[in-house]
Image (tube, rainbow, N blue to C red):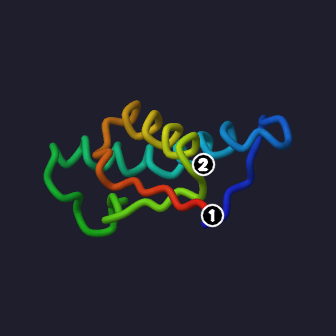
Amino acid sequence: RRYKIEGITGGDDYAAMRQVLQRRYAKVAQALREAGGAEPAAGQARLPDLVLVDGGKGQVAMAREVFTELGLDLARIVGVEK
């Protein structure tokens, strides 16, 4: 997926990541709430088995914050760094 980042100062990678994660996974969180914790209906947004984050501890911490705010399972986040 590609997102156009809006309202973020250029070079602020953490803020850009936060915006993308919130925009992408807010739909998933809403679908899970509507399903009452069960699997969402066909065609609804679903939580992937694994979320790969391009970065180290700081980026993973940012992703954890977003997932916590949205009430999503944190065990699915993995950071990939050089």
Mark 1: secondary structure: loop
Indicate the amino acid at tag 1: Lys
Across and down, in percent, residue 56 comes to: 56, 50
Left or right of 77 on screen, residue 17? right
Question: Disc 1 designates what residue?
Answer: 82
Question: Disc 2 designates what residue?
Answer: 20
Residue sitting at 40 percent across and 40 percent down?
67
Across and down, in percent, residue 48 comes to: 35, 63
Between 61 and 2, the one lying in front of the other is 61
Between 39 and 20, the one lying in front of the other is 20
| The C terminus, quarter of image | bottom right
- In the depicted structure, whether residue 59 falls above or below residue 70: below
Across and down, in percent, residue 27 comes to: 42, 49
Q: Residues within 10 Å of mark 2 (few under 14, many from 20)?
A: some
| Disc 1 and disc 2 in contact, CB within 8 angstroms | no
Between 31 and 62, the one lying in front of the other is 62
Left or right of 36 on screen, residue 73? right
Across and down, in percent, residue 68 comes to: 37, 34
Task: Please tell me which of labels 1 and 2 falls first in the chain.
Answer: 2
Viewer-nearest of discs 1 and 2: 1
Left or right of 59 on screen, residue 41? left
Residue sitting at 74 percent across and 47 percent down?
5
